C-alpha cells in the first residue's frame, strides 16, 4: 500500500486483496492518516479484486474512526468486482465512492 498527500487529503492506494491477511497493513497506513485536526483520506481500490468480511468490517471501523475525529473517509476507482461488493453490502451508501482521485480529493472542499 502506498500513501501520498494531495493538499490536506491523504490518498492510499490499496493494491492488494483486502482480506484478514492484509487488513492490518491498511489499518496501519490509515492510522497514520488519523493525525491532525481534521483527518481526511481517500482509499483507492483500482487494483483490489477481493474484499473479505474482515476487510469490509475494517472499512466500517475506519469510517467511524475518521468520523469520530471530525474527518471523513471515501473510496475511489473501485474495480467492477469491488463496486459490486460495495453495492451489494450497502457500503456505497455509507462511504462516498468516486470514479477518480482528483474528484474524490475535490469532494473534501465542497
Image (tube, rainbow, N blue to C red):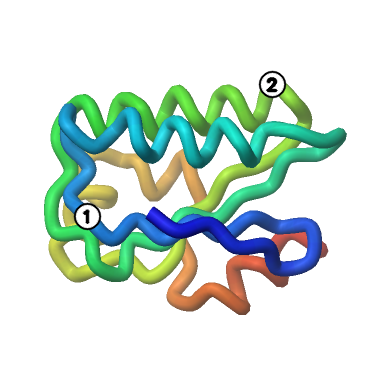
Residue depicted at x 86% and y 34%: 37
Q: Is residue 110 visible?
A: no
Instruction: Give residue 1's quadrant in the image.
Output: bottom left
First in residue order: circle 2 vs circle 1: 1
Q: Is 88 located above or below residue 46 in the figure?
A: above
Q: Is residue 47 visible?
A: yes
Residue depicted at x 63% and y 31%: 66
- Residue beneath label 1, please? 16
Instruction: Give residue 82's quadrant in the image.
Output: bottom left
Which quadrant does the C terminus fall into?
Answer: bottom right
Residue depicted at x 49% and y 40%: 29
Q: Of residues 15 and 66, which is closer to you in this image? A: 15
Q: Whole-percent x and y of residue 49?
A: 14, 59
Q: Whole-percent x and y of residue 60?
A: 42, 29
- Residue beneath label 2, please? 68
Q: Of residues 20 and 69, which is closer to you in this image? A: 20
Label 2 Cα crowd, 10 Å radius (few <14 / some 14-19 / many 20+): few
Q: Is 108 located above or below residue 94 in the figure?
A: below
Residue depicted at x 42% and y 61%: 13
Q: Tell me the number on the disc at residue 30.
A: none
Q: Whole-percent x and y of residue 41?
A: 61, 50
Alpha carbon separation for disc pair 2 and 1:
27 Å
Amino acid at each position: 500500500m502506498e500513501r501520498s498527500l494531495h493538499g490536506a487529503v491523504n490518498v492510499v492506494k490499496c493494491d492488494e486483496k483486502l482480506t484478514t491477511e492484509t487488513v492490518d497493513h491498511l489499518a496501519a497506513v490509515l492510522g497514520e492518516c488519523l493525525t491532525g485536526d481534521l483527518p481526511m483520506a481517500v482509499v483507492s481500490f483500482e487494483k483490489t479484486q477481493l474484499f473479505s468480511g474482515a476487510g469490509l468490517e475494517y472499512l466500517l471501523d475506519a469510517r467511524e474512526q475518521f468520523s469520530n475525529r471530525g474527518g471523513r473517509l471515501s473510496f475511489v476507482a473501485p474495480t467492477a468486482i469491488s463496486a459490486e461488493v460495495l453495492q451489494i453490502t450497502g457500503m456505497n451508501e455509507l462511504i462516498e465512492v468516486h470514479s477518480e482521485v482528483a474528484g474524490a480529493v475535490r469532494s473534501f472542499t465542497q
